[in-house]
Image (cartoon, grey):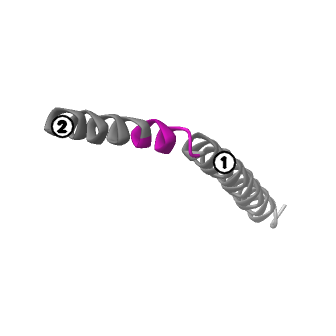
Amino acid sequence: MKSMKALFVVAALTASSFAVAAGGGDRTVARADKLAQASMETYRLEQQKAESSVAEKAKSVEHANC
């Protein structure tokens, strides 16, 4: 009887670990990765805009006295 209880406990713990593994964690990680990539793309575009405006200002300052 004790061996049956032990077998039941082991089976219950094993089944619960499989249930947790399919709980949607992959979707959460994929969504977080997608949001991080979108954020980095937005940051990169903002940095490019800032660099181009600085370069345009430098050109206009160089030729201001011409």
Residue type at mark 1 is Arg
Residue 51 position, x and y percent, is 69, 55
Q: Residue furthest left?
A: 2
For disc 2, the marked residue is: 1
For disc 1, the marked residue is: 31
Secondary element at image label 2: loop
Q: Residue at x 33, y 42 (%)?
A: 13
Residue 21 position, x and y percent, is 48, 39
Q: CA distance from mark 1 to mark 2?
A: 47 Å
Mark closer to the observer (1, 2): 2
Is 46 contained in the magenta span?
no
Quadrant of the drawing holding the N terminus: top left
Residue type at mark 2 is Met
Residue nearest the viewer, comparing 56 with 44: 44
Q: Residue at x 72, y 58 (%)?
A: 46
Q: Taking 31 as reference, is 49 left or right?
A: right
User: Crowding at label 1, few (<14), some or many (≥20) Cα neighbours within 10 Å?
Assistant: few
Residue 57 position, x and y percent, is 76, 63
Q: Residue at x 50, y 41 (%)?
A: 19
Asked if residue 12 is positioned above or below residue 58 in the image, the reply reads above
Q: Residue at x 55, y 45 (%)?
A: 25
User: Crowding at label 2, few (<14), some or many (≥20) Cα neighbours within 10 Å?
Assistant: few
Residue nearest the viewer, comparing 55 with 21: 21
| Extent of the magenta region | 16-23
